[in-house]
Image (cartoon, helix red, strand yellow):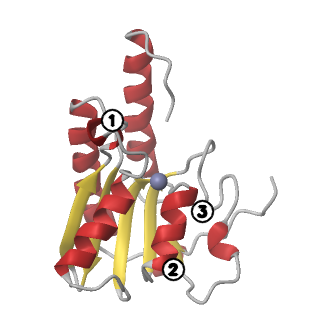
Amino acid sequence: MINKPKEYDFASLLDNDELVMRQALSLAKKAADIGEVPVGCIIMENNKIIAAEYNRRETDQDATAHAEILALRAAGKHRPSWRLDGCDLYVTLEPCLMCSGAIIQARIRRLIFGAPDPKGGMAGSIYNVFDLPANHQVIISGLVLQEECSGQLKDFFQRRRLMGSKDGF
Ligand SMILES: [Zn+2]
């Protein structure tokens, strides 16, 4: 462990965080249905969903087609502005290095994730890039519906192993 995991800011959790995370979970289910690693992402602005996406890396054959990146792009078009200050990003899995960087770049106010990712999580599991000095600080609220989010991923990989695929996320 290079970096101490961030203290999750439970005080910043909002009443509807679980509700929104449930919607992100059903997006992730859609990804699983088409053979994608189940990760779903929602961006909220003033209690309204402005982006709802799921992982499409295989479908698009695009290494950057993670749910968060697709949602940041959709939210930027919706506003329209790449600056998503005041917006909250919900994702079922702890963001990777690429997505964590993009979340900071987009000036997201709060990051709310479900399952920690011991293999690639950059919001405290492997490293915490959100702790690096940057001109924008993201509030990290976690871990919302951790069991459901972790369970969905575990089920997916278990099924895939049974089917003989070795490719990891
Ligand atoms: Zn990512």
Residue that appears at 37% across and 61% down: 69
Left or right, 72 with reference to 23 = right
Cβ atoms at labels 1 and 3 below 8 Å apart = no
Query: 151 or 1: nearer the eye?
Result: 1
Q: Which tag, 1 or 3, sits closer to the chain's start?
A: 1
Cβ atoms at labels 3 and 2 below 8 Å apart = no
From the viewer's perspective, is the residue at label 3 or at label 2 nearer?
3
Q: Which tag, 3 or 2, sits closer to the chain's start?
A: 2
- Residue hosting label 3: 123
User: In the image, residue 118 lies at what x, y percent?
Assistant: 63, 44
- Under tag 2, what secondary structure? helix
- Kind of residue at disc 2: Ala
Cβ atoms at labels 1 and 2 below 8 Å apart = no
User: In the image, residue 148 lies at what x, y percent?
Assistant: 38, 44
In the drawing, what numbered circle is on residue 58? 1
C-alpha separation, residue under disc 1 versus residue under disc 2 = 37 Å
- Residue hosting label 2: 11
| The CB of the residue at mark 3 lies under 8 Å from ligand 1 | no
Q: Residues within 10 Å of mark 2 (few under 14, many from 20)?
A: few
Q: Which tag, 1 or 2, sits closer to the chain's start?
A: 2
User: In the image, residue 132 lies at what x, y percent?
Assistant: 70, 76
